[in-house]
């Protein structure tokens, strides 16, 4: 029997009915399961028979067991079967078959002799009973938590699982210490009228059953693909130069994140070339101790004992040379001389992704004279205006070389520059020195030409306002 998506028997195809909520037949679909395994040995069959000797059967959540196909049933991924249990029988879904099952059993140290048996393919009555029991599990979990809370037990009921035939209920719980639940089992047996089985799990297994989103923004590794939980130590964070912050290093389960072990081997390989972080350098200015290590840039930061606020970054090869000098009994040079100076590249943002106002519409209208005058502020009475002053300065600068040329004597000596009253001074000099230079211009008309009044801008005549009369 296959699932509703019609692709559960072939592991090379994906589920055709996947939606935002997952496959509609997730209980029986072998491809939409969160811990499904791709059978890369599906075409290898050394015995020549279509039936596989051992199969991997999954139950609720991440529980998987291995069973022996004694009746040589044609089983494939997604087949719903009835398997041996104690007591009665259980209903599960085949998650793996073929030669890959033996490799998985060898990997997980499962003895072949103690493998349970596969009874038969599940009929329609078995499937209906199994689905009805799965619907009752949520209500039973709520009632079980109320009973445990009434008995003041320091435990948490995480999940409830019914056996396929309804003859047993397994309660998964988490607790920090040992719990005496003898009275609890009596209460459960009287309330649910079935055999009770209590199973303690860890906090990591609890998060794997519940699921969630991690701080990285993706689904939890334990609930998607991680099957074995290795112990994580705080030394893994220290080797990776991470701050020991419980809020950042802890996951959904409250323990250290499993992803701290992913890159630990790479860090350990790189740190073999580094000197010890407790290295003390004896320099000419005093002792220096290590403060920080950069694994990627292969640098170490040192600071003097007397001035710990000034840090000096050194390459690890320079640090090894300084250590060798200290071993000879000599003092190393000062850290300022050995500091690595990096040439920072000045980059320009062509796309302007870093500018905050890149999406705002900028006013590109040219500024008028009124806007410029407002920016410059109020003018005093002595000022004639920005345009008048500019024109006057330019004209006075143009007239300077001419006046200097006129004030030169025949002997080449230069006279001081004349003021605005040049005509009056020229007449006085002519009376006193009749033999003076005759080239001096004393005509007031020509003088007025050289000293023109600054040009004033004509005001624009505004057209009369249209009052809108017909």
Image: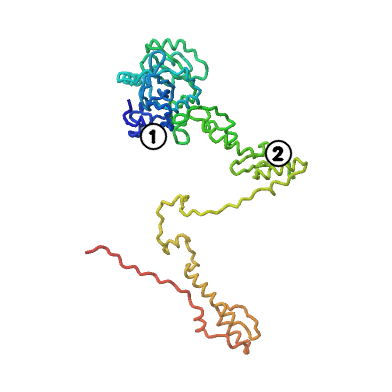
Q: Is residue 301 above or below residue 348?
A: above
Q: Is residue 287 left or right of residue 463?
A: right
Q: Residue at x 38, y 16 (%)?
A: 89
What percent of the width, then of the height, locates residue 258?
51, 31
Which image quadrant for residue 160?
top left
Quarter of the image where the C terminus is located: bottom left
Q: Earlier in the sequence, mark 2 or mark 1?
A: 1
**Can residue 244 be seen by looking at this rendering?**
yes
Say if mark 2 contacts mark 1, CB within 8 Å. no
Q: Is residue 458 above or below residue 178?
A: below
Q: Nearer the viewer, residue 66 or 154?
A: 66
What percent of the width, then of the height, locates residue 228?
50, 27
Q: Residue at x 57, y 80 (%)?
A: 403
- Count of picture labels: 2
Which image quadrant for residue 467?
bottom left
Q: Nearer the viewer, residue 70 or 12?
A: 70
What percent of the width, then of the height, locates residue 312?
65, 45
Disc on res. 12:
1
* Crowd class of label 1 (few under 14; some 14 to 19; many from 20; radius 10 Å): few
Question: Which residue lies most toward the left here?
Answer: 470
Disc on res. 198:
none
Q: Which residue is mark 2?
A: 280
């Amino acid at each position: 029997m296959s699932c509703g998506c019609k692709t559960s028997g072939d592991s090379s195809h994906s589920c055709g009915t996947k939606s935002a909520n997952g496959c509609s037949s997730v209980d029986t679909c072998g491809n939409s399961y969160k811990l499904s395994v791709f059978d890369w040995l599906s075409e290898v069959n050394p015995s020549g028979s279509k039936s596989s000797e051992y199969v991997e059967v999954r139950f609720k959540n991440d529980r998987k067991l291995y069973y022996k196909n004694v009746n040589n049933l044609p089983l494939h991924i997604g087949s719903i079967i009835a398997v041996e249990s104690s007591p009665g029988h259980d209903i599960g879904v085949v998650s793996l078959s073929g030669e890959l099952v033996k490799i998985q059993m060898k990997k997980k140290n499962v003895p072949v002799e103690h493998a349970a048996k596969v009874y038969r393919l599940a009929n329609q009555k078995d499937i209906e009973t199994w689905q009805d029991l799965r619907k009752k599990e949520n209500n039973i979990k709520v009632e079980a938590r109320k009973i445990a809370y009434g008995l003041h037990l320091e435990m948490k009921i995480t999940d409830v699982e019914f056996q396929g035939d309804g003859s047993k209920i397994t309660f998964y719980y988490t607790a920090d210490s040992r719990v005496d639940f003898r009275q609890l089992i009596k209460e459960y047996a009287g309330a649910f009228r079935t055999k009770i089985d209590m199973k303690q799990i860890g906090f990591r297994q609890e998060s794997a059953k519940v699921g969630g989103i991690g701080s990285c923004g993706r689904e939890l590794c334990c609930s998607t693909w991680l099957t074995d939980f290795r112990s994580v130590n705080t030394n893994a964070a220290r080797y990776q130069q991470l701050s020991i912050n419980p809020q950042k290093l802890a996951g959904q389960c409250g323990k250290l994140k499993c992803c701290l072990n992913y890159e630990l081997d790479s860090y350990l390989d790189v740190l073999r070339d580094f000197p010890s972080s407790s290295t003390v350098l004896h320099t000419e200015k005093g002792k220096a101790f290590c403060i920080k290590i950069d694994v990627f840039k292969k640098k170490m930061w040192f600071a003097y004992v007397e001035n710990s606020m000034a840090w000096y970054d050194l390459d690890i090869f320079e640090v090894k040379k300084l250590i060798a000098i200290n071993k000879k009994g000599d003092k190393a040079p000062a850290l300022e001389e050995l500091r690595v100076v990096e040439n920072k590249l000045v980059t320009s943002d062509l796309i302007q992704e870093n500018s905050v106002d890149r999406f705002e519409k900028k006013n590109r209208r040219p500024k008028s004279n009124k806007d410029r005058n407002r920016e410059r502020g109020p003018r005093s009475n002595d000022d004639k205006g920005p345009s008048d002053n500019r024109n006057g300065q330019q004209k006075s600068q143009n007239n300077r070389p001419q006046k200097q040329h006129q004030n030169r004597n025949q002997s080449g000596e230069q006279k001081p520059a004349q003021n605005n009253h040049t005509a009056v001074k020229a007449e006085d000099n002519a009376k006193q020195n009749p033999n003076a230079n005759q080239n001096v211009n004393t005509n007031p008309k020509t003088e007025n030409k050289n000293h023109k009044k600054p040009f004033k801008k004509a005001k624009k005549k505004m057209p009369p306002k249209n009052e809108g009369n017909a």
